[in-house]
Amino acid sequence: MLKKMDFDEKQSFGFGGNAMIARVSRFSWSPFLFLITLTALLSFQITTNTIYPIKIVFSSTSKTDVSSDTRTSCVGFFGELPERKAVMSITEFGGVGDGKTSNTETFRKAIRYLKRFGVSGGAQLNVPKGRWVTGSFNLTSNFTLFLEEGAVILGSQDPKEWPIIEPLPSYGRGRERLGGRHISLVHGDGLTNVVITGNNGTIDGQGKMWWELWWNRTLEHTRGHLVELMNSNNILIANLTFCNSPFWTIHPVYCSNVVVKDMTILAPLKAPNTDGIDPDSSTNVCIEDCYIESGDDLVAVKSGWDQYGIKMARPSSNIVVRRVSGTTPTCSGVGIGSEMSGGIFNITIEDLHVWDSAAGVRIKTDNGRGGYIANITISNVTMERVKVPIRFSRGSNDHPDEGWDPKAVPVVKGISIRNVLSFNSTKAPVLEGIEDAPFGGICMKNVSLRGVASSLSWHCEFVSGFTDEVFPTPCPQLQSNISSSWCSYS
């Protein structure tokens, strides 16, 4: 079990707020300046196909002038992109975009062919306007998948075209069922320099079939994600619409240097477990300027499940979630956990806009999880008609098997929440720590929950911290004397 850490110790581990700012700044400036000057990829083609420019877009309304937008960005997490020396269309491999013909083998054949160009700068596969039905396919390194305007990739309705793969080692089994799990529609393992982008094309998982298997309790293996990249680095997913994922929509796991930007992610609000973006045991992840509607968390940071996550000890760290907006009637705008057994630290969430949702920001954990959550900074959050604006929860009673250790309790310290404005919330915050491991170092400043009756009491158990300019009046466990605490400097 991880020993409890005081704040001096956490500073030495890089858990302090200043450490996060310094790390992001030092890491991002050099590639950031390069990316501003990057306007197009390559000038050489092996065919006459158009080579589409890959740009880190700062504004959905000014895509051709990246220098005109001066908003803070973490796109520097994504490194330099080599020129793509080969550009081909899926039609050159026999693809048929009629919405009926299966293109599973066509996509697989195309990527196998284009893999040969990886050592010379890589390749780009263009998907033109049309409706392209396909089962799962694996990407390759130094590769761009580009969906032109009007292009729609449709997930196959044949479960056999979503093969079963091994469970993740940090989960020990499929998340929903014992044993293996269905592979994602777009998949990759052990890759580098991968781009999934386009002129606002669409990847549609056609997940209703999978949701019905879940609702009917006839699901045999855990559902596949829409896009999952494992053990990979330097990943960019941008300027597309993803919809109707069978399970979590974007799942980078054991990855580093990942940017997800200018994405629209949609699922029916009752579609089960259709999280938007779930970075999992990953580091240096930037999620910016995304709109999400889903039947689960818009963004959820994870790091493994109970004893399997503890054993692997692969944390999620240095993650920035910025300018994300959306709605989820059953879950939260941004969630931390509940699978957090490998540890989660140095997380920045800012400029979040959530409406008509069950929770705004939520930290989720439980006995048996172990691990730690530290240095979480949440700021500039606007909520409308969110039931519980701030929630720390426990007791999900959700474990992979009988091997979980009830004595493995998480350490949760260093949660800064400031500049929060909520309209028409119906409940005061619920902050529930764990009896054997109280949540400490909670700092709240300038938090106004309008519409919550002043007579409604906060529900707080096993938590401690400080508050300043918080309405309604917080619980006694959160002291009002902030000036002499570490919180005054956060």
Image (cartoon, helix red, strand yellow):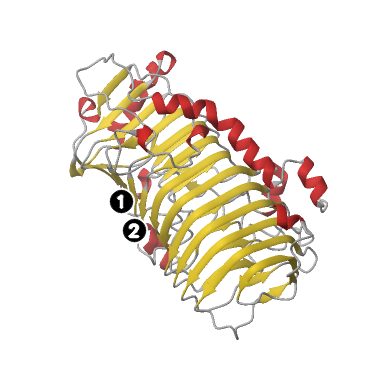
Indicate the position of residue 22 as horizontal and vertical percent values: 65, 37
The disc labelled 2 sits on which kind of residue? Met
Q: Secondary structure at mark 2?
A: helix
- Mark 2 Cα shell of 10 Å, populated few (<14), some (14-19), many (≥20): few
Q: Earlier in the sequence, mark 2 or mark 1?
A: 1
Q: Residue furthest left?
A: 98
Quadrant in which residue 141 is drawn: top left
The span from disc 2 to disc 1 (Cα, nearest Å) is 7 Å
Residue at 72 percent of width and 63 percent of height: 367
Residue at 64 percent of width and 81 percent of height: 457
Q: Nearer the viewer, residue 114 or 469?
A: 469
Task: Left or right? Give the position of 341 relative to 148.
Answer: right
Q: Residue furthest front?
A: 483
Q: Which residue is identified by label 1? A: 157
Task: Left or right? Give the position of 245 relative to 175.
Answer: left
Task: Left or right? Give the position of 426 relative to 110.
Answer: right
Label drawn at residue 209: 2
